Amino acid sequence: MGRQAVGRRGAAKSVPKKNIAFVLRERISAPVELALFFSVAFIIIRFAPVSLQIAMGLVPREPTRLLGILTHPLLHFSLAHLMANAMGVLFLGVMISMFSRSTFYWVTIFTWLMGG
């Protein structure tokens, strides 16, 4: 049975408690999805032509290569490099997600754009 809350007219109504497994799954899913996204991107980019890999990189002082600002976090040198980054995303991402999922998204966007 859930907690009791008072409605607008003073009548008590039941507020269901959230299941802890549901809350954990909800909070942990975003960092896990991001780590999986990086893994899939690594596999796709690994089999892509070298010209595409070069085009996705960040080249300083080249205005034609501004797309690299958005795509350079997807490039990884090796599987070990990807796994090291994925572990950081998972550990720190879960820690941030336990506070707030929207905070996780904002931190990810900020880090993605400012990381280069």
Image (cartoon, rainbow, N blue to C red):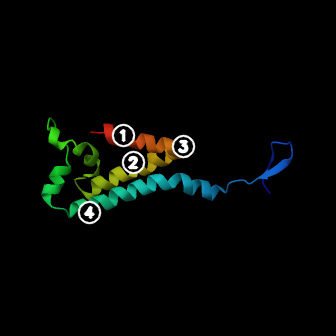
Which residue is disc 4 drawn over? 44
* Residue ID at (68%, 54%): 18
**Residue 27 has which mark?**
none
Residue 53, x across and y down, in percent:
18, 54
Per the image, the residue denoted by label 1 is 111
Tell me: 71 left or right of 91. left
Callout 4 environment at 10 Å: few (<14), some (14 to 19), or many (20+)? Answer: few
In the image, 57: left or right of 81?
Answer: left
User: What kind of residue is marked 2?
Assistant: Gly
Spatial CA distance of label 2 from label 4 is: 21 Å
Mark 1 Cα-neighbour bin, 10 Å: few <14, some 14–19, many ≥20? few
Residue 103: % across, % down: 49, 41
State the mark number for residue 88: 2
The answer for how far apart the CA atoms under marks 2 and 3 are is 18 Å
Q: Along the polypeptide, which appears first: circle 4 or circle 3?
A: 4
Label 2, secondary structure: give it: helix
